[in-house]
Image: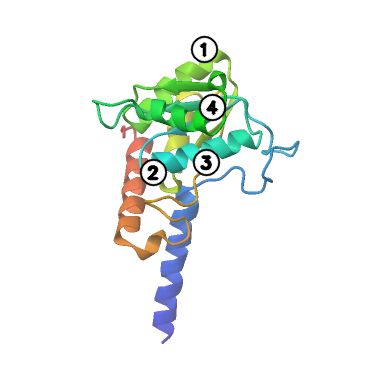
């Protein structure tokens, strides 16, 4: 019986560790709106990268904008279907439908990988004089996004705020499905590749 308890405890420690590792949330101790507290200040921009459940990522970025976390929204991502509009353009339309002024939105439409999201979006940030940004992605993808952006621009302050739940991932219950384990373990592998000098 003790060995069963030990196995179960080890399993849940692994699950919790993966969840925390993959989904850093800089705003976890903040309220719904920015404040003067350390780590909870307003940013210059909110950046959402496409991929996975792009709509959920967009909606999370929109909610942050509407709660006053930044005055600029940046959407990054090429077209998943080359015959149609880019993901970034679709994200922009969702934001406009939500009542956000087009003048507050910037799109980057050419990136096809997380590394390219960082490279091409950082070019926009640097040309605009942006010094701080909130990054939004799915929980399983958030850590890698943060790594790539910080590597590209160590002089810019990047904070993270992942989407807790979307169509592909639940922050609390991902470990109950094979798909959840696939996403988690594949992201861990990709992060190792990135940290050892590779590109994903």
> Relative to 50, is 16 above or below?
below
Identity of the residue furthest to the top in this view: 127
- Mark 1 lies on residue: 127
Identity of the residue furthest to the right in this view: 36
- Find numbered disc 4 in the image and state the secondary structure of the residue it sits on: strand
- Mark 2 lies on residue: 53
Residue in front for this viewpoint, 150 or 85: 85
Mark 2, residues whose alpha carbon is within 10 Å: few (<14), some, or many (≥20)?
Answer: some
**The N terminus sits in image quarter:** bottom left
| Mark sitting earlier along the chain (1/2) | 2
> Relative to 18, is 42 above or below?
above
Q: Is residue 114 left or right of residue 46?
A: left
- Find numbered disc 2 in the image and state the secondary structure of the residue it sits on: loop
Q: CA distance from mark 1 to mark 4?
A: 15 Å
The answer to whether residue 137 is visible is: no
| Residue beneath the point at 28% across and 26% down | 84
- Mark 3 lies on residue: 60
Q: Quadrant of residue 174?
A: bottom left
Q: Position of residue 127 (x, y in %)?
A: 52, 12
| Mark sitting earlier along the chain (3/1) | 3
Q: Position of residue 176 (x, y in %)?
A: 37, 65
Identity of the residue furthest to the left in this view: 83
| Residue beneath the point at 23% across and 25% down | 83
The tag on residue 73 is 4
| Mark sitting earlier along the chain (1/4) | 4
Mark 1, residues whose alpha carbon is within 10 Å: few (<14), some, or many (≥20)?
Answer: few
Circles 3 and 1 in contact, beta carbons < 8 Å: no
Q: Position of residue 4 (x, y in %)?
A: 39, 81
Circles 2 and 4 in contact, beta carbons < 8 Å: no
**The C terminus sits in image quarter:** top left
């Amino acid at each position: 019986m003790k060995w069963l308890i030990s196995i179960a405890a080890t399993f849940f420690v692994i699950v919790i560790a993966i969840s925390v590792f993959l989904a850093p949330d800089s705003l976890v101790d903040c309220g719904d709106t920015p404040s003067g507290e350390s780590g909870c200040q307003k940013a210059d921009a909110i950046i959402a990268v496409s991929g996975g459940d792009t709509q959920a990522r967009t909606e999370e970025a929109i909610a942050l904008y509407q709660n006053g976390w930044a005055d600029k929204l940046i959407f990054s991502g090429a077209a998943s279907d080359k015959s149609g509009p880019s993901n970034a353009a679709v994200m922009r339309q969702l934001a406009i439908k939500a009542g956000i002024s087009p003048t507050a939105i910037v799109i980057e439409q050419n990136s096809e990988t997380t590394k390219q999201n960082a490279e091409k979006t950082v070019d926009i940030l640097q040309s605009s004089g942006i010094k701080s940004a909130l990054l939004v992605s799915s929980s399983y993808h958030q850590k890698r996004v943060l790594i790539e952006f910080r590597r590209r621009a160590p002089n810019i302050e990047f904070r993270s705020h992942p989407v807790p739940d979307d169509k592909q991932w639940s922050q609390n219950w991902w470990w109950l499905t094979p798909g959840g384990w696939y996403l988690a373990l594949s992201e861990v592998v990709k992060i190792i590749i990135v940290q050892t000098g590779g590109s994903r």
